[in-house]
Amino acid sequence: MTVVHTVIDSPEGPLTLMARDGGLAGLYIGDEQYRPPRAAFGDRDDRPFGAATRQLNEYFAGERVEFDLPLAFSGTPFQETVWRALLQIPYGETTTYRELAESIGRPTASRAVGLANGRNPIGIVVPCHRVLGSDGSLTGYAAGIDCKRRLLELERGGRVVAG
């Protein structure tokens, strides 16, 4: 198993991208809450991240609404089910933890879905920022609520998001 990383600039500050065997395995915004220890990132190697860097720059410029990158999930089967469900939330739209739980056939698992969502290792690309509390409030985001708000505003063409 080969693990490498790079760091790129973004409007949200430095993004650390991690690849495992050619797939994007991590995207961490700054020093977010669940960022793995430095040793987990492997050596720095910018070469495998050309497409990810280009697509992220396009996203932040408002020119990309969907990512087309190979992903390398590494979680429990339940976490990976939740993370794949996150990929189905369209750009500029949101859902709730309850709706996400219902979409994976686990209608009573809102809290577990929330925990899995919070542990999503591939932020932005796997859009956990598009999940809101049941009352539409901005709840929980490993990189902070302000970051979540800005990402949602970007996706809504600059329209302010409540919360």
Image (cartoon, rainbow, N blue to C red):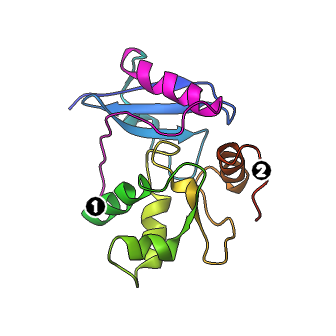
Left of 69 or right of it: where is 12? right
Q: Indicate which label's residue lies in the foreground, 1 or 2.
A: 2
Q: Residues within 10 Å of mark 1 (few under 14, many from 20)?
A: few
Q: How many numbered tags mark residues here?
A: 2
Residue 149, position in %: x, y? 71, 53
User: Residue 96's quadrant in the figure?
Assistant: bottom right
> Helix, strand or loop at disc 2?
loop
Magenta stretch: includes residue 53:
yes
Q: Which residue is the site of mark 1?
A: 76
Left of 133 or right of it: where is 53? left
The answer for how far apart the CA atoms under marks 1 and 2 are is 36 Å
Q: Which residue is the site of mark 2?
A: 159
Which residue is at a point 73% across and 52% down the rendered structure image? 146
For the magenta stretch, what is the residue range?
47-75
Magenta stretch: includes residue 141:
no
Residue 37, position in %: x, y? 45, 41
